[in-house]
Image (cartoon, grey):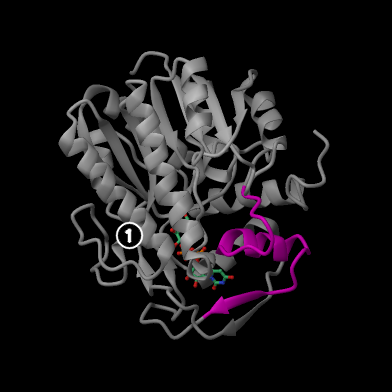
Amino acid sequence: MVGKMSILVTGGAGYLGSHTVLTLLQAGHSVVVLDNFSNSSAVVLSRIAQLAGRAPTFVRGDVRDGACLRNLFLKYPIQAVMHFAGLKSVAESARQPLNYYLNNVSGTLQLCQAMAEFGIYRLVFSSSATVYGDSNEMPLSEDSPTGVPTNPYGRSKLMVEELLQDLADAEGRWGIAVLRYFNPVGAHKSGFIGDDPNGTPNNLLPYISQVAVGRLKALQLFGNDYPTPDGTGVRDYIHVLDLAAGHLCALEAVGRRSGLSTWNLGTGRGYSVLEVISAFERACGRKVDFVIVPRREGDVAQCWADPGKAFRELGWRAERGLDEMMADAWRWQLTNPDGYKESGV
Ligand code: WQD
């Protein structure tokens, strides 16, 4: 068990970041959150404080702003960084590649440069299974070839993985964990924090939960002609709190080993879109209307993890099943029909 540390969480007001910040606070760590609220809300911070019984320190700023980072490191004795801040829409990245490379790649470079200046060499990086592209056998292991990502978002994640490897190869003091997320879904059991994307959701779960709560009319199901059991896309959905727990284990790992290590954070089980819709309907007791439309550009047929390496090396594995993921996702949506917007809390 790593001693209590002071951790910077970039993007800590976002969906994945907020659940990880809560987990870190509950484990006794001190947390500084850096967020520019480009895809998150200040309300999250008070919700986290209510759940944890204490608040993280908050700095409003952008990870691309070197001066902001240096002022933060001057003011707070940070010992490790969890880097979530970045843009993450596959579709949007194809429309705005420069914005994605500036945020995801340049932002990480600024962060690493400021970290090194202050002698901070422990980093947990938020990567994605998207780096595997579309050319692999399932399940995906960390040794599976990182194919050719099908979009600028995926390419930006792969570029960052490669530049972090160069840093670790050149400077032995770096301890870096690259975590390849599969499909994070669900929410904290309280319903206080959850996934609240800006505008119309790109991802399946927030879309179907907004249909169920009446904000959206029907899901567009992107293709039922894939080479999968029921023709719809298969993904490895993982509960966001299992993902957060994986970050805690990775933090301990970077504290005791130098170099760069990569771990898949997935359950090892794939579910199709139709299976997810049925599971969500069971959880919410409502019908989720959908219409089948052509495939979405850039989608792969199937993607699920071999999570064995994280279990062997980190002692971590996902514990929550699909029904629990759906129930927790629905509780968040039902408690917050308009996400964080409406709340004054
Ligand atoms: C899941 C399945 C769709 C929406 C992406 C990124 C990944 C990560 C998660 C950031 C697919 C189908 C979806 C809809 C649908 N992003 N679908 N109608 O594309 O697997 O992964 O988001 O961390 O890096 O690549 O997730 O939720 O968009 O799609 O039919 O309106 O649901 O075709 O089969 P995806 P998703």
Q: Is residue 15 left or right of residue 265?
A: right
Q: Residue at x 50, y 43 (%)?
A: 85
The one of 293 and 111 positioned closer to us in this rendering: 111
Name the residue that disc number 1 marks.
131
Up/down of 7 relative to 230, above or below: above
Residue 188, image x, y percentages: 60, 39
- The picture places residue 68, in percent across and down from the top left corner, at 53, 30
197 within the magenta span = yes
Q: Residues within 10 Å of mark 1 (few under 14, many from 20)?
A: many
Can residue 124 be found in the magenta stretch?
no
- Give the residue displayed 77% in from the left and 52% down from the top: 337
Which image quadrant is residue 217 in?
bottom right
Q: Name the side, left or right, on which 193 lies relative to 1.
A: right
Quadrant of the frame with the C terminus: top right
Q: For the magenta stretch, what is the residue range?
A: 195-222
In the image, residue 22 sits, relative to residue 222, either above or below, namely above
User: What element does badge 1 sit on?
Assistant: helix
Q: Quadrant of the N terminus?
A: top left
